[in-house]
Amino acid sequence: MKQNDNWTSIYAGTTQVPSDILRAVAQQAGVHMFTDSDDVLYANQSYIAVQCRTEGGNKRFRLSRRGNVRELYSDTVVGENIQEFDYPMEPETCYLFYWGRESYAQ
């Protein structure tokens, strides 16, 4: 890694950079990290989709802003006006969370 005046250069000598290295680089760049696990995650302004690829158990999620959270497949209210939550997950299972200011209405 080389620090320059307005940017940082990072060289990886492999095509398979370990996830912990990628996570550290992203954190240094100021990227919001929703979770520290190696599960597949997609997020936008209203939804967080997660495929639990690692071992199951409680997973911790950190939101970039407060909001109401509901897991849509199970129709479970996770919390209201929260910025962080734990959720029990089974391996090889997908989850879809609504995340917003309004309560999710079906």
Image (tube, rainbow, N blue to C red):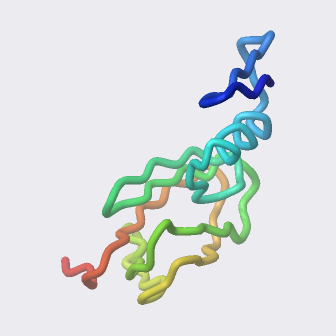
Q: Position of residue 18 (x, y in %)?
A: 78, 30
Instruction: Find the residue positioned furthest to the bottom.
Output: 80
Front residue of this view, candidates 21 and 89: 21
Q: Nearer the viewer, residue 74 or 8?
A: 8
What is the x, y in percent for residue 3? 75, 28
Residue that lies at the very extreme toward the front in this rendered image: 5
Question: Could you tell me how many numbered marks the image carries?
Answer: 0
Front residue (pair 60, 88): 60
Left or right of 77, for residue 93: right
Tell me where residue 73 appears, x and y as whole percent: 38, 67
* Residue 13, horizontal then vertical, whole percent: 80, 10
Judge whether 97 appears above or below 84 on screen.
above
Residue at 37% of width from left, 71% of height from top? Answer: 99
Q: Is residue 100 left or right of residue 66?
A: left
The image quadrant that residue 16 belongs to is top right
Rendered residue at 71%/53% (across/down): 37
**Residue that protrudes farthest toward the left in the picture:** 106
- The residue drawn where x is 62% and y is 28% is 7
Residue drawn at 58 percent across, 77 percent down: 84
- Quadrant in which the N terminus appears: top right
Q: Quick one: quadrant of the C terminus?
A: bottom left
When the figure is inspected, residue 25 is found, relative to residue 72, above or below; the finding is above
Tell me if residue 40 comes above or below residue 70 in the rendering: above
Q: Quadrant of residue 75?
A: bottom left
Q: Nearest the camera: 98 or 3?
A: 3
